[in-house]
Image (spheres, helix red, strand yellow):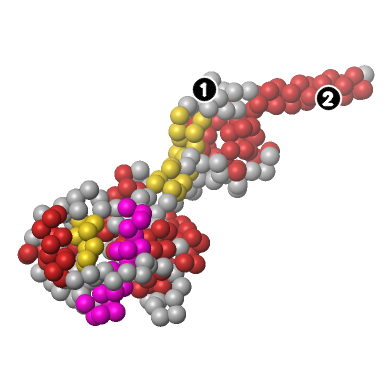
Amino acid sequence: MRWLRSVILLACVALLGWSFHFAVSRPLPELREGVVEIRRGWGLSEIGRAFFGSNRWSVGSFKAYVILTGRSRRLKAGEYELDRDSIRSLTRKLAAGRVLQYRVTVAEGVWASDIAVLLEGAGLCDRERLLSLIRDPAFATDMAGARVPSLEGYLFPETYFFTKGMSEEDILKTFVARFNEKARPLLRSDTHSAHDLLTLASMVEREAARDEERPVIAGVFWNRLRRRMPLESCVTVEYALGRKKKKLTDEDLRADSPYNTYRRAGLPPGPVGNPGLRAIAATVMPAATGYLFFVAAGDGSHHFSATWAEHLRAKRRAGRGR
């Protein structure tokens, strides 16, 4: 009869194994739907309760399956979106780190402070901490690979996918890595540093509203630099003031800041926004022009002039000042 007991025991083990396989493979109605966050340092019990609440059987089955499959040290923290998952698919998702990703699109020309507000609004960072890192010269220099006052300009404008739980440092590393991949190869010159080219490109980005005008505006700025004329760019004054304005006052133009190119000759200390590839390309390859002035026409275009007298006439036609 010993053989019979062995057969029965094997049958029971097989039945239990099949039952367990079925239990971990079927979609669980008690599994919480939507988005569940798993935090760093949580144990299996805490993770199980996050998904199954007070359902002890499911929590126990989850723990047993994770341990039996050798994944207890491979589960990754983050946010997970659940959709009729089983214990098996849930465990695979956790082990692979298939966390919920947030799409963030950064527009060309925006300030670092705008990016910080955008990311905090998506729940991805602490705005003040992100800005403190961006404005820390030591951190910025380490990230940019050159001595720079901040990471303004090095936060490449594009669409990103971030996950909650990323540190502010990792978020900034992602931005700078994309900058190094896409923008830095264009910033080459025998006479100017990449930082200076990027600084001028940020001005071109914010001054130009039309693609065809970017090389012309860049040409105006280069002409003024060669003649040692102040650049007199309104976007640098806005940056000095820390706010964007439709019309600058005479008092605004007198702002005492190294970023005020009405009062200080040459380039400002660093970029006044984060330029895209078109503005960078226009700065590196500007239009060959004799223009020294431009004024906004009011429709997104500009009037360009070679002399002060022409510029004054253009200003009167546009009904604007610079």
Q: Quadrant of the C terminus?
A: bottom left
Tell me which residue sits at (64%, 32%) in the image. 88
* Residue 317 spot, x, y in % from top left: 13, 55
Q: Would you say the magenta stretch is mainly helix, strand or loop?
A: helix
Q: Number of marks in the image? A: 2
Instruction: Tell me which residue sits at (40%, 45%) in the image.
Output: 104
Q: Quadrant of residue 9?
A: top right
Q: Nearer the viewer, residue 214 or 254?
A: 214
Tell me where residue 66 appears, x and y as whole percent.
63, 38
Amino acid of disc 2: Leu
Residue 55: percent from left, percent from top: 51, 25
Dot 2 corresponds to which residue?
10
Tell me which segment is drawn in magenta. Answer: 210-229
Is the residue marked by circle 2 packed among few (<14), some (14-19), or many (20+) residues within 10 Å? few
Q: Which residue is mark 1?
A: 30
Coordinates of residue 250 in the picture (x, y in percent): 7, 64
Up/down of 212 relative to 91, above or below: below
- Residue at 44 percent of width and 69 percent of height: 187
Residue, x 19% and y 60% (percent of image)? 295
**Amino acid type, callout 1:** Glu
Q: Is residue 11 left or right of residue 126?
A: right
Q: Disc 2 and disc 1: Cα gap in Å?
A: 31 Å
